[in-house]
Image (tube, rainbow, N blue to C red):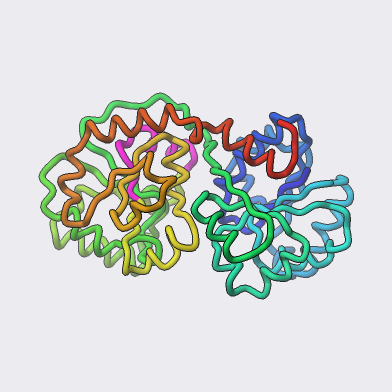
Amino acid sequence: MALIEIGGSHDECLLTQFHALKSSSKLIAFVTTQEILDRNPTFEKYIDHQFVLLKEELSDKFKAAIKIKKYLKKVNASKVVLNTAHGNIARNLAVICLFNKMQFFGILHTTIKLEESFTQKLISWKVRNYFLLSEFLCNKAQKISKLNFDWFYPIRFDNQQKEKTSNTKTRIVVIGGVENRRKDLSGFVDMIEGIKQDVEFIFLGKSEAKNEEVIAFKEKLAKKGLEDKVKLYDSFVSNDEFATIVNACDAILPLVHPNTPSAKEYFNRQISGAMTVAFGYKKPLLIHDAYAHIHEMQIASVYYYPESFKEVLTENEQLKVIELAMQQSIVLQVETQEKRYLDFMEIKS
């Protein structure tokens, strides 16, 4: 069994897969980069064989694919999962392995690849079975293509069972750093203006201090006198720090709003990472009411309109009820999702 992740953007999907495969007594060969291994030291205990590609080796997409194919043959991999099933190396690997007996699976992180990408069409010559990271997107993919699709939530995280620390203030986590494309930053500042209660919003990702978007965001916060209510990180957030903050928070805020750049992709063509983090850590989501129709998020969500956001923050009892419901949900248990993953690949759990 082999897993491949060389892009470095979807590490968070791997731990669920590693644990599922190990629980079914599979040997795991992992094709990756040193940067991914350095960021995720806990991966080591799951990996039986690994092939680490250097940065310079990744620059030649064809040679990189040939090296990966040789490694897969060396470890006699019968099934291969492309953790990021798009891009030129994935395309080259799929094409040169087309007549090989290895069965390829892929994780598709956005449905737009099925609609517009010629590269994806070439990948799909070999990859006939795709995972999506939400039921909603899986249903959408099935309407676009006749390939085989299923879904699972990668909701196993490092240290997610850490003991929760008590809060003296309401803590709301925004997954990731400051970035207009992924979050409605302007709408956020307007939403929190005038909040009287003791609340802290934590952008849990690197917000590069010299980045123009970060500078503009800080200036807008300062102008409104809100800088004390928002915490940013200007460096990489370790897995341990991430787990500590999420465990201690009261809710997770994706900051995806309709009619903004954030809505072009999220809850439309791809799922927000905030959803899987919330599902994994059993933390309520604060979601714009425009997305109340997405059934799978309803168990986890408190809905708001921007103008009602201040009132929603006071609904502490509702947040506690949702957190309990998430903890008791069979669907949101890691074992349930890991079984879904194995079943689609016809691996006995």
Q: Quadrant of residue 337?
A: top right
Q: Nearer the viewer, residue 113 or 142?
A: 142
Is residue 160 left or right of 231 when viewed as pictured?
right
Tell me, yes or no, whether the highlighted magenta stretch contains residue 242.
yes
The C terminus, quarter of image: top right
Magenta stretch, main secondary structure class: helix
The N terminus, quarter of image: top right
Residue 161 position in % (x across, y down): 47, 27
Is residue 155 left or right of 309 when viewed as pictured?
right
Residue 305 to residue 76: above or below: below
Q: Nearer the viewer, residue 194 or 155?
A: 155
Name which residue lies at 56% across and 54% down: 138
Is residue 300 left or right of 139 when viewed as pictured?
left
Q: Quadrant of residue 153?
A: top right
Range shown magenta = 238-253
Residue 202 position in % (x across, y down): 31, 46
Name which residue lies at 57% across and 63% down: 143
Residue 113 to residue 1: above or below: below
Name which residue lies at 52% across and 56% down: 137
Tell me, yes or no, whether the highlighted magenta stretch contains residue 336.
no
